[in-house]
Image (cartoon, rainbow, N blue to C red):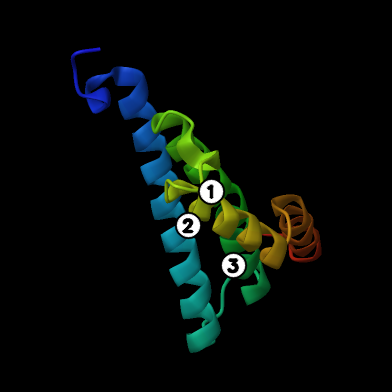
Amino acid sequence: FGFPVATFQAVAVQAADRYIDLRAMEVTLWQAAWRLASGARGTLPVAGDVAVAKIWASEGVRRVVQTAQHLHGGFGADVDYPLHRYHAWAKQLELSLGPAAAHEEALGDLLAAHPLG
């Protein structure tokens, strides 16, 4: 179009949303790791922090790789372009951790068993 793709508002917004996903994945991972390592008490058992980290990882990584593929013109299926590996890793992560819905259910069970009030 004669302009850098990143100068388009829609592209910038998508990239910003995925940046937020990445930061959320990072902070929930470190929160869960800190709770596991330190044994610090929280409102919920540490399994709640782990479930939140798994939800963000499962949902966030899928959104990140899908947006990356769209922003790169759909090259994610082309094995000559490295983006296809990220799709494979994202799928492996989801299969290893389980779908977000399963972790949301586990978190819901924890919330039901440990009222926050």
Residue at 47% across / 30% down in the picture? 70
Amino acid type indicated by mark 1? Gly
Give the side of residue 16 with respect to residue 46, left or right.
left
Vertical position of residue 77 compared to residue 37: above or below: above
How many C-alpha atoms fall within 10 Å of the one at disc 2: few (<14), some, or many (≥20)?
many
Vertical position of residue 21 compared to residue 8: above or below: below
Vertical position of residue 60 compared to residue 52: above or below: above
Regarding residue 83, the answer to whether it shows in the image is yes
Q: Which mark is residue 49?
A: 3
Q: Quadrant of the C terminus?
A: bottom right
Element on which disc 1 rests: helix
Which residue bears the numbered disc 2? Answer: 25
Residue at 48% across / 87% down in the picture? 38
Element on which disc 2 rests: helix
From this viewpoint, which residue is outermost toward the front?
A: 80
Give the mark nearest the N terminus, 2 or 1: 2
Vertical position of residue 21 compared to residue 35: above or below: above
Q: Are marks 2 and 1 in contact (CB under 8 Å)?
A: yes
Give the mark nearest the N terminus, 2 or 3: 2
How many C-alpha atoms fall within 10 Å of the one at disc 3: few (<14), some, or many (≥20)?
many
Q: CA distance from mark 2 to mark 3?
A: 12 Å
Q: CA distance from mark 2 to mark 1?
A: 7 Å
Which residue bears the numbered disc 1? Answer: 60
Residue at 42% across / 46% down in the picture? 81
Give the side of residue 42 with respect to residue 100, left or right.
left
Element on which disc 3 rests: helix
Residue at 50% across / 44% down in the picture? 65
Amino acid type indicated by mark 2? Met
Q: Quadrant of the N terminus?
A: top left
- 61 or 4, which is in the foreground? 4
Q: CA distance from mark 1 to mark 3?
A: 16 Å
How many C-alpha atoms fall within 10 Å of the one at disc 1: few (<14), some, or many (≥20)?
many
